[in-house]
């Protein structure tokens, strides 16, 4: 698989695309374009991402486990089957009270060249 992304026109079991790491966070970019990235994360219990912000929207979809997303200071519980939008330029963090796998979709604004 070139650049560690997934091959086109193939079906994959999403949980097979990443290996969880004990007491750590694993990540793998599944697709990357100028419009955004699709990244798979595996969090071990108790792991997380400290508060930060991004200049574009991000969508979180939980595949396994449970995550608490702290968005602008407000906790949002995310479990399998849920989807959460984290708006651009708003501080957010991720906490894993149990082992979890999430799909992160980063949506970049594409500016049109009007020349």
Image (cartoon, rainbow, N blue to C red):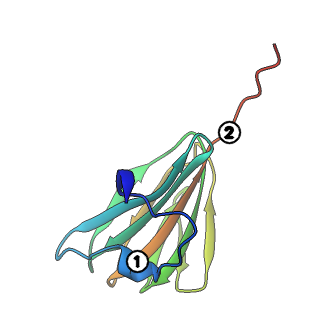
Apparent side of residue 110 relative to residue 52 in the rendered image (left or right)? right
Find disc 2 in the rendering and name its residue.
109
4 or 36, nearer to the observer: 4
Apparent side of residue 8 relative to residue 85 in the rendered image (left or right)? left
The image shows residue 38, relative to residue 34, as above or below, that is: below
Residue, far front: 9
Q: Residues within 10 Å of mark 2 (few under 14, many from 20)?
A: few
Apparent side of residue 21 relative to residue 73 in the rendered image (left or right)? left
Place of residue 14 in the rendered image (x, y in percent of width and height, measured from the top left):
46, 79
* Quadrant in the picture for residue 67: bottom left
| Label 2 vs 1, first from the N-terminus | 1
Place of residue 89 in the rendered image (x, y in percent of width and height, measured from the top left):
58, 42
- Label 2: element kind: loop
Residue ID at (36%, 81%): 16
- Label 1: element kind: strand
Find disc 1 in the rendering and name its residue.
101
Disc assigned to residue 77: none
Residue ID at (68%, 39%): 109
Place of residue 29 in the rendered image (x, y in percent of width and height, measured from the top left):
41, 57
Residue ID at (76%, 21%): 113
The image shows residue 55, relative to residue 40, as above or below, that is: above
Residue, far right: 114
């Amino acid at each position: 698989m070139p650049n560690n992304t997934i091959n086109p026109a193939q079906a994959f079991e999403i949980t097979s695309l990443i290996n969880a790491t004990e007491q750590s966070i694993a990540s793998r970019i599944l697709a990357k374009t100028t419009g955004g990235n699709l990244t798979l994360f595996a969090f071990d219990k108790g792991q997380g991402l400290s508060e930060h912000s991004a200049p574009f929207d991000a969508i979180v979809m939980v595949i396994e486990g449970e995550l608490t997303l702290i968005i602008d200071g407000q906790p949002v519980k995310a479990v399998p089957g849920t989807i959460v939008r984290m708006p651009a330029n708003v501080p957010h963090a991720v906490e894993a009270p149990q082992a979890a796998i999430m799909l992160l979709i980063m949506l970049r604004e594409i500016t049109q060249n009007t020349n």
